[in-house]
Amino acid sequence: MPKLAPAEAAQPVVSPVSSAAMFLVLTVAEGGEDAVRDVVPDLTAYARAVGFGYPEAGLACVTGFGSAVWDRLFAGPRPVELHPFVALDGPRHRAPSTPGDILLHLRAERLDLCYDFADQVLTRLGDAVRVVDEAHGWRYHDRRDLLGFVDGTENPEGIEAVAATLVDAERDPEFVGGSYVVVQKYLHDIASWKALTDREQESVIGRTKAGNVQLPDAALPKTSHVALNTIAGPDGEEQAILRANMPFGSFRDGEAGTYFIGYCATPRVTEQMLRNMFLGDGEGHQDRILDFSTAVTGGLFFVPPTGFLDDPPPAPAVDERAADSPAPPASTRHMDGSLGIGSLKRS
Ligand code: HEM
């Protein structure tokens, strides 16, 4: 594989803020591994096929794989920091770890393109996968969450976003340009939130609501979302993740929420933020946003570089796989995967 800088090798992790997004979490059925492996090299081609005619819509598709499925799909080295999402049991709030083998994070200015991409890929995958979580997000006013606050302002940009999110050769030479992504679906208790004054809401978040400015240090509560998510590394440098959260809601289901998604070159930064939020900062301060937002899912995925997707390593040896899973049923084992729309598979 040619030597590429992380940004050249990466899936569209660092993408402009979009007006629409679709989050799909899939599990791979026992015996579905070969069908999944057949589709992986065509993912880039599907995105191109759906998005090419609408360049202004900026369709961006990012695919990640969970820890448990990695060894079922791919022989060879694993991303060094890939592990299952760590559930957290705080004094008052829980972050559950929920099933998920594959994450599809689809972004565009138009939801229909996300839908088309998902339709084509999921039709091809058939019974090899099950959709275990799905959220359709849309831009809400001037990029606000459903709590009414602008979400995403302090995200890193440009070179800083690349450095924060993409694995470089020092971190993991086998997976330069990869990224770790954490997703959590949060449901808001909107009635309780609305019972607060704007001032009280601002102390929960740590920013002003109308003007979207951070509260001055002296007025920033230690239990605020901003305070608990501003963390420094051993060298005192602030640690950043790239968030692409989206609001979603359903009146039928009585749900209004935020789909949290955070990319980082190492899962450790996002995990530290989560520990601060749920377990506390060591001085008894947990994130007050959790009094109004319940995490109902949690997953950690590795987003491999595009070269890996286009030309994945061979399947693990049958006896390696057989150690954990029974022989696959004939119906899913020999699915014809050829798409012929421009896969970049190399010999
Ligand atoms: C209910 C779910 C969440 C909502 C509604 C939410 C909303 C917000 C809002 C409104 C801000 C302030 C503006 C900005 O984006 O900079 C913010 C900041 C931030 N959030 Fe969240 N967030 C949620 C979950 C999370 C989670 C789970 C994490 C980390 C694991 C996180 C990490 C951050 C970080 C790093 C900042 C920037 C802090 C700073 O430097 O000022 N958020 N969030």
Image (spheres, helix red, strand yellow):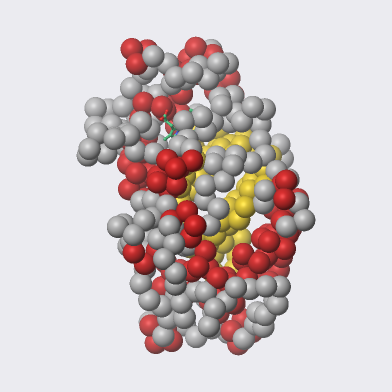
Q: Residue drawn 34% across and 59% down?
A: 169
Residue 162, above or below 84: above
Q: Is residue 93 left or right of residue 46?
A: left
Q: Horizontal and vertical percent for residue 115?
A: 72, 54
Pick the front one: 205 or 61: 61
Most extreme residue toward the left, as rendered? 234
Instruction: Look at the image and tell me whether residue 212 can be seen.
Output: yes
Residue 131 location, quadrant:
bottom right
Residue 17 location, quadrant:
top right
Q: Is residue 87 left or right of residue 24?
A: left
Instruction: Look at the image and tell me whether residue 295 can be seen.
Output: no
Residue 333, above or below 133: below
Residue 280, above or below 50: above
Q: Horizontal and vertical percent for residue 41?
A: 58, 72
Q: Residue drawn 48% across and 38% down?
A: 157
Q: Residue drawn 24% across and 27% down?
A: 283
> Could you tell me which quadrant the N terminus lies in?
bottom left
Q: Horizontal and vertical percent for residue 104?
A: 58, 57
Number of numbered callouts drawn:
0
Q: Horizontal and vertical percent for residue 24?
A: 60, 55
Pick the front one: 76 or 297: 76
